[in-house]
Amino acid sequence: MILDCHMHSWRYPQHFDREVMLANQPPRRRGWSEEQFKQMWELPVEHYLEEMKGSDVAKALLLGLKAGATLGIDVANEYLAGLVRERPDPLAWGCCVTPTEPGAAAEVERCVNEMGAAAVGELGPVYGGFRLDDPKCFPVWEVARDLDVPLVVHAGPAQARWGHLKYGDLMAVDEVAIQFPDLRIVICHLGYHRYEEAAFLVAKHENVYADISWLPQLAGFDRRALSRYLPQVEHGYYHLIHPLLYYFTQTFGLTDKLLWGTDFPAGSPGRSIETLMGINSWLEQRHLPKLPEESVRRMLHETWRKVFTKLSDSGR
Ligand SMILES: [Zn+2]
C-alpha cells in the first residue's frame, strides 16, 4: 500500500492574507485580478482525489501550513480535519501550529486526541519564524512524542520574501533529535536545498527520516510546476537523488529512512511514482550502479508504516 505522506489542500481567499501573498508574487502578476489569483490558489481536495484515481496511491496525508506572515497562507486545522471526516478513506491529516505561540501544545493535543491528526506538520521554521531547537517549542515536541505522532518539518531554507533563512538551519534538527530520542522527525524535501546535511542527519539519528517530495518538480520533471523555470535540467532529479540513495543503500545500508510524497500541488501522484520507478532504467542507460529494487519498494510501500504509526494500524 502506497501512502503519499505529503500533500496539501487550501482555499482562496479563506486561508490567505492577500497583502502578504501579493508581496511574494513576481512583478508580472502585480496587475492580476482577484479572479486570476483565485484560479491560481484555489486548491480543493477534489483536485488531488481526481489525480489520485489514476495512480497507485492508496492513502494521502494532508498537511497543514502556517505561513501567514511570510507566504500569506494559513490553513486552518478545522478545515483539514473536516475534509478527513468526510473522507476517512483515502485521507488522513497532519495538524500545524506555530510551536512558539502560547497554546500550541494544547492545540496539538486537541487535534490528535479529538480530531484524529496523525502527524504534526508541515512545520516551517522559516515560514513561521522560529528555531526548532528553541526551548519554547519543547512542550509541543513533548506532546507529539507522548501521543506518538511524528513531526513533519520543512527544516531547511524556504522561498518566501519575508521569511528569515537563519531559521532554516538543519542543524537544529540534530539538537531536537538528541533531546527527544523517542520523537520521530521527518525532514521534508530531503532538506531542500541542503541535501547532504539532511542525509547526514538521517544517517546519524535513528529517529530522523526524510521525504523526497517536491524534488522531481524542482529538478524539472513536472511541466505544470516549477519546472518551467528549469527546463534544461531534464535529468536533474536523478542526478540529485541517485548519489543520495546510493549513499544510503550502499554505505550505511539504510534503505528504510526515506519516504515518498508529492507535495501536491507541486507534484502529481501518478507522475511522481513513475519518475521514481524510472530511476534504474535511467541509471542502466548511463552505466551507473543501479539501486536495489527493494530500496525503491520500501520507500513507496513500507517505511511510512514505521513513521506514521497511527495510519499503519488503520491501514492494515
Ligand atoms: Zn508541503
Image (spheres, grey):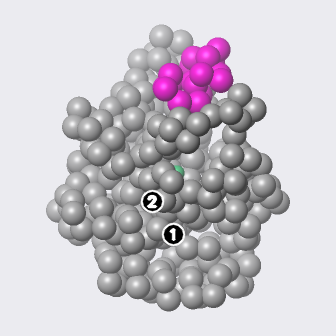
Q: Which residue is mark 2?
A: 63
* Prevailing secondary structure class for the magenta stretch in the rendered image: loop
x and y percentages locating residue 297 in the rendered image: 33, 41
Can you name the residue that lies furthest to the top here? 285
Q: Is the residue indicated by label 1 positioned so its CB lies within 8 Å of ligand 1?
A: no
Q: Residue at x 49, y 26 (%)?
A: 224
State the image quarter where residue 105 is shown. bottom right
| Mark 2 and mark 1: Cα distance apart in space | 7 Å
Name the residue tied to disc 1: 96
Residue 261 screen position, x and y as percent: 42, 46
Please state if 30 lies on the left or on the right of 45 as rendered: right
Considering only vertical position in the picture, is 30 above or below 197? Answer: above
Q: Please, is residue 73 above or below residue 35 in the view?
A: below
Q: Which residue is depicted at the point 27% across and 52% down?
A: 59
Instruction: Magenta stretch: give its range.
Output: 219-235
Q: How crowded is the residue under tag 1: few (<14 C-alpha within 10 Å), some, or many (20+)? A: many
Amino acid type at mark 2: Leu
Residue 195 vertical position relative to residue 181 in the rendered view, above or below: above
Secondary element at image label 1: loop
Q: Is residue 17 magenta?
A: no
- CB at disc 2 and ligand 1 closer than 8 Å: yes
Q: Is residue 21 left or right of residue 35?
A: right
Answer whether residue 311 is visible to the viewer in this image: no
* 231 falls in the magenta region: yes
Q: Where, quadrant-wise, is the C terminus in this rendering?
A: bottom left
> Compared with residue 15, is residue 226 higher up or lower down, i.e. above or below?
above
